[in-house]
Amino acid sequence: MRRLTLTRPDDWHIHLRDGDYLSQTVKDAAARFGRAIVMPNLSPPVVNVQDAERYRTEILQHVPRSFAFEPLMTLYLTPQTVAADIVAAGQSPFIAGCKLYPAGATTNSEAGVSAITQLYPIFEAMQTANLPLLIHGEVTTHSVDIFDREARFIDESLAPLIQQFPELKVVFEHITTQEAAQFVADQGPEVAATITVHHLLYNRTDMLGSGMKPLLFCLPILKRDQHRQALLAAATSGNPAFFLGTDSAPHPRSSKENACGCAAGCYTAHAGIELYAEVFDAAGKLDRLEAFASHFGPDFYGLPRNPDKIVLEEIPWTAPKTLPFGNELLMPLRGGETIAWRLASQSMSSS
Ligand code: NCD
Ligand code: ZN
């Protein structure tokens, strides 16, 4: 049996939700990751330091005693965001960045922005405060085909933004296309991207080719296999611009299996590092996993790497079909199916 010891990884993009949902989401994330960048798309969204600190306190109440999990908080940029919010965020030890959602792009993005250039004064303040900008990079124009929305965003919004703010740290979140991987590889050290494990594992034919699979529906949507392969090449390349962000995004079963519109988001936190190990191993690149999962993220954010380790073992296990989720059920990715790598019990204490 192969064993793999890694510096404890971090998740640079996760949705923990709030209220009753936190007991499951925080337990799963804290068992694997030392830190996680917590997305602010609650309803209502997390828009200022007070909201973020309240939310952080709520999350910390759900961290099991044996872990030293640190939630890194983000603010949700809206047309009402003012420079003073950014200055306050820059001074808070808990805020790691601000998230830009184009209005209508994804779950709980209604409060986002329609005209990105209107936020340029805010980006200026972020550049000064050295606060990273995390971007959901898709255009939302109805006439643009859903499979083309990320690539169009690069030319229409991202490239001009990066040109205007060359010192602003930008994370192009959950990239899904060859174009995005190439664009990020061509930029300087201020620009990075997170890559989810579901975009490394699956393509759009997996989602649509033999009965539509709501569990695989997320945004940005899964693309052709050539894009999955480009993401896999980027993730395993050793380029520090690409690092781990699960985008684990739970929805109750009733919202996923819903004939009136399946909610976008895949829950992967229950196997948040194990599935990446499987993908890297299948590509013959297991030796590149530690840098992608545990080094490049903290290096980009200017934070220390985690001091402790986790251990993975190549012992197949069957993921649960359902998990408790408030009064509802959550269907995790790969539920009822085998996952090739398992978290060893010694990983359970984060001392
Ligand atoms: C996310 C969610 O459910 O909050 N959904 C998703 O499909 N990834 C939002 C997001 O990151 O787009
Ligand atoms: Zn997300």
Image: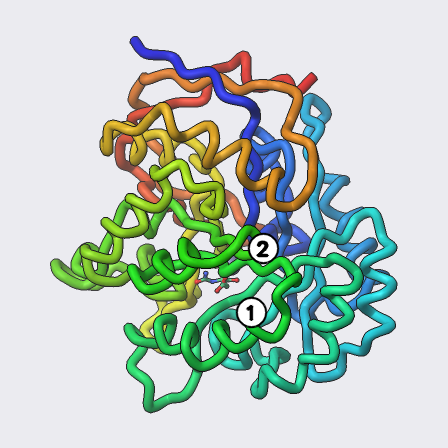
Residue to which mark 1 is pinned: 162
Q: Residue at x 53, y 32 (%)?
A: 294
Residue 177 in picture, x, y percent from top left: 31, 61
Residue 205: percent from the left, percent from the top? 16, 59
Report which quarter residue 78 is drawn in.
bottom right
Q: What residue type is labelled 1?
A: Ile
- Can residue 252 be seen in the rendering of this structure? no
Q: Can residue 148 be seen in this view?
A: yes
Name the outermost residue toward the left: 210
- Across and down, in percent, residue 341 comes to 34, 24
Quadrant in the picture for the N terminus: top left
**Residue shown at 33%/41% (left/top)?**
335
**Residue 301 vertical placement versus 51 (above, below):** above
Does residue 52 appear left or right of residue 69 in this picture? right
Q: Earlier in the sequence, mark 2 or mark 1?
A: 1
Camera-side residue of 319 and 153:
153
Please tell me which residue is depicted at 70% across the width and 47% down the height of the picture. Answer: 72
Asked whether disc 2 touches disc 1, contact meaning CB atoms under 8 Å apart, the reply is yes
Please name the amino acid that badge 2 sits on: Glu
For label 1, count other residues whose C-alpha is less than 10 Å away and answer few (under 14), some (14-19) or many (20+): some
Q: Mark 2 points at which residue?
A: 190
**Helix, strand or loop for disc 2:** loop
Measured from the top left, where is residue 75 in percent x and y? 71, 63
Where does the C terminus fall, quadrant-wise? top right
Q: Is 58 in front, or is 232?
A: 232
